[in-house]
Amino acid sequence: MNDELDMSGRPSRATEAFFGRRKGKPLRDLQVERMEHLLPALKVDLSTAPPSELAALFPGPVERLRLEIGFGGGEHLVHRASENPRTAFIGVEPFVNSMAKLLASVEERGLENIRVYDDDATQLLDWMPEASIDHIDLLYPDPWPKKKHWKRRFVSQVNLQRFHRVLKPGGRFCFASDIDTYVNWTLLHCRDHGGFEWTAKEAADWITPFQTWPGTRYEAKAKREGRTSAYLTFNKIDLPAA
């Protein structure tokens, strides 16, 4: 058995890790108020058993469920939630200042189809029911460019197993990065996992942004610094028989 999985076949808790800062500059008074009052109202409570259908976490009708891991300033998450009101979104971001920024946008736009989690994404993934999510976004994750730190990258066999478990049949995993080594890393890890089919048929498929892509500040920074981005889309497929 893979030593990253427990006896039930789920990822071992020992593989869980979060690397990075939790907080930057001090929050303003209104940001503090939102973190104290709005965050608890929107936060997914992992101390309770998950509902059989994650749509129960949202007040309105839900046709699809999407998860974004590491939403940064929240530009992409807010854009998607605004253009798809019948899609429910769960956004994960441990960085306090980024969470405060997202909460401001949610409040200003009156978005009811966003829920959040402010800690390690692996905790949320392990809490979620099997085959409960239609789509996972991992956009411009920390690349950990030094080779000795590559083991900290979120894309790993154990986390791809988490993705595969919670995605519905035919569910989608989208990855974007401007770091060539991380793009190659992700392609190789998805190939080796066996449960994800890369959808690209020609070069234009992975250098063209996702449909109705709003852009992100990380992407803009990459362009200013002369780096191009790759946009990878994978569909969940059945794992090969052992």
Image (cartoon, rainbow, N blue to C red):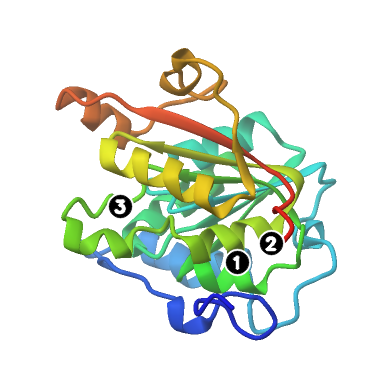
Q: Residue at x 59, y 78 (%)?
A: 1
Q: Is tag 1's residue or tag 2's residue first in the polypeptide sequence?
A: 1
Would you call the spot at circle 1 few (<14 residues within 10 Å), some (14-19), or many (20 or more)?
some
Q: Is residue 189 above or below residue 2?
A: above
Q: Is residue 227 visible?
A: yes
> What amino acid is at disc 3?
Asp
> What amino acid is at disc 2?
Arg
Q: Is residue 179 visible?
A: no
Q: Quadrant of residue 97?
A: bottom left
Q: How far from the left and from the top, in percent, is residue 72? A: 38, 49
Q: Is tag 3's residue or tag 2's residue first in the polypeptide sequence?
A: 3
Q: Which residue is mark 3?
A: 142
Q: How far from the left and from the top, in percent, is residue 179? A: 27, 38
Q: Is residue 156 left or right of residue 168?
A: left
Q: Is residue 142 left or right of residue 106?
A: left
Measure how far apart labels 3 and 1 are at the Cα level: 19 Å
Q: Which residue is mark 1?
A: 125
Q: Which residue is mark 2?
A: 165
Would you call the spot at circle 3 few (<14 residues within 10 Å), some (14-19), or many (20 or more)?
some
> What amino acid is at disc 1?
Leu
Q: Is residue 203 above or below residue 81?
A: above
Would you call the spot at circle 2 few (<14 residues within 10 Å), some (14-19), or many (20 or more)?
many
- Callout 1 touching callout 2 (CB < 8 Å): yes
Q: Quadrant of residue 99?
A: bottom left
